[in-house]
Amino acid sequence: MSRLMLRKALLGLLCLPLTVVLATAEVHGGAAAACHKLAGLLSNVTVLPSQDRYSALSTENWCVFPWGAYVLMLKLHRSGTAWAKPSCIVQPAAASDIQQVVRLLTDRHVPFAVRSGGHLPSPLGANINDGVLIDMSMIKGVTYDAANNVVKVGAGQRWKTVYDALDAHNVTVVGGRVVDVGVAGLTLGCKSARCVFIVLGC
């Protein structure tokens, strides 16, 4: 992998990521070995298949919504991303965690997917089989800079939380009309026609 590709992957993760998937034919030690290493390095943010919360986390995607429109979409377009079984799930809580995870996975050529709100229906978009799922839900926070009229939003945030936080300052942003959609995915968009219902911000 070239340095340019690695730089782009890191930049994407730090700038509201949803889906960076690095897939290579050569897997050194495999995803299971990488997960074992991650569990040693970042035990508090790494979830293995043997742990109780793994099942709920591995299926936390858009098509499990109870709302009528989403149930209809589930029936018409079953998203393979919702039912993937990653080798492990990492929930980084800081940029330093993300850097460690991405460095380890790219060095070992282990494929991974990144999930923000989990609403991307594209295969490998928000979940992965035999790879590592980086779940951004712990990268939260909404910080409003009134002097510069700029808001800084965590990649794992949902739009409802963003709107509620900004409402206190009497300002808002153009974002998701379905408020439980993740910030990063809507911001970055999607290349599937099925995403139109979800990702249009206005």
Image (spheres, grey):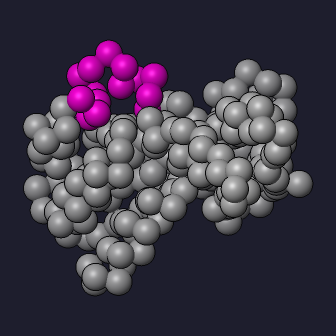
- Which residue is depicted at the point 19% across and 58% down? 104
Q: State the image coordinates of residue 85 (x, y, percent, origin top left).
A: 38, 37
Q: State the image coordinates of residue 157 (x, y, percent, origin top left).
A: 59, 39
Task: Answer whether residue 125 is magenta in the image.
Answer: no
Q: Is residue 67 left or right of residue 24?
A: right
Residue toward you, 120 or 80: 120
Q: Is residue 111 visible?
A: yes
Task: Answer whether residue 48 is magenta in the image.
Answer: yes
Q: Which residues are magenta?
A: 44-58
- Which residue is depicted at the point 29% across and 70% down? 24
Q: Residue placed farthest to the right in the image?
A: 202
Q: Residue placed farthest to the top in the image?
A: 52
Q: Residue placed farthest to the front in the image?
A: 147
Q: Is residue 117 visible?
A: no
Residue toward you, 52 or 180: 180
Q: Which quadrant would residue 16 be assigned to in this image? A: bottom right
Image quarter in which the C terminus is found:
bottom right
Q: State the image coordinates of residue 99 (x, y, percent, origin top left).
A: 28, 57
Residue 184 drawn above or below residue 70: below
- Which residue is depicted at the point 13% across and 62% down? 28
